[in-house]
Image: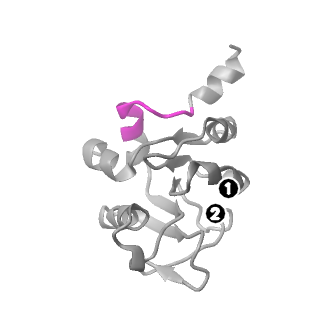
Amino acid sequence: MNDSTAHWRDHLIATPEAIRRLLNATRRIAVLGIKTEMQADQPAFYVAQYLVDAGFDVVPVPVYYPNVSTILGRPVHRQLAGIDPPVDMVNVFRRPQDLAAHVDDLIAARPRAVWMQLGIADAAVAERLARAGIDVVQNRCIMVDHRQLAA
């Protein structure tokens, strides 16, 4: 393994201490694939609600619901790259097979981190993001980790 290969792997975040540091450094989170209040019983809504309640500035980025203009009282965005000011993290609620379609937008948005929720992982997508200098968390629930690890 050469140095450049080792370097991108440093962006794959998995240890509790690295996750704690990431969460404590994060303030603004785009939630890609967020659901609406009509689906309040689904993780793609109630995890985002938890983040708002925990004090994060949440930016809704739904994939569906073209007629919805606000979620959680915040304006909806349709692309990550156009969010201003930029987000620190993108929290992803998309099926693993749908992730690749979002990679270019994720890289263009230049978040510090991309967090793929529990059950969501894709090694090729994670590598592309990591090689772009973006920290990646896979297959973990941000709500659970925040409750357990954040200061």
The tag on residue 118 is none
Residue at 61%, 42% (x, y): give it.
Answer: 134
Answer whether residue 16 is visible to the viewer in this image. yes
Dot 2: what SS?
loop
Within the magenta stretch, is there residue 17?
Answer: yes
Q: Which residue is mark 1?
A: 102
Answer whether residue 72 is visible to the viewer in this image. no
In contact (CB < 8 Å): disc 2 and disc 1: yes
Dot 1: what SS?
helix
- 113 vs 3: above or below: below
Q: Nearer the viewer, residue 79 or 151?
A: 79
Say which quarter of the image contains residue 76.
bottom right
The tag on residue 80 is 2
- 126 vs 71: above or below: above
Quadrant assignment for the N terminus = top right
Q: Which residues are magenta?
A: 11-20
**Residue 143 coordinates in the image, percent (x, y):** 34, 53
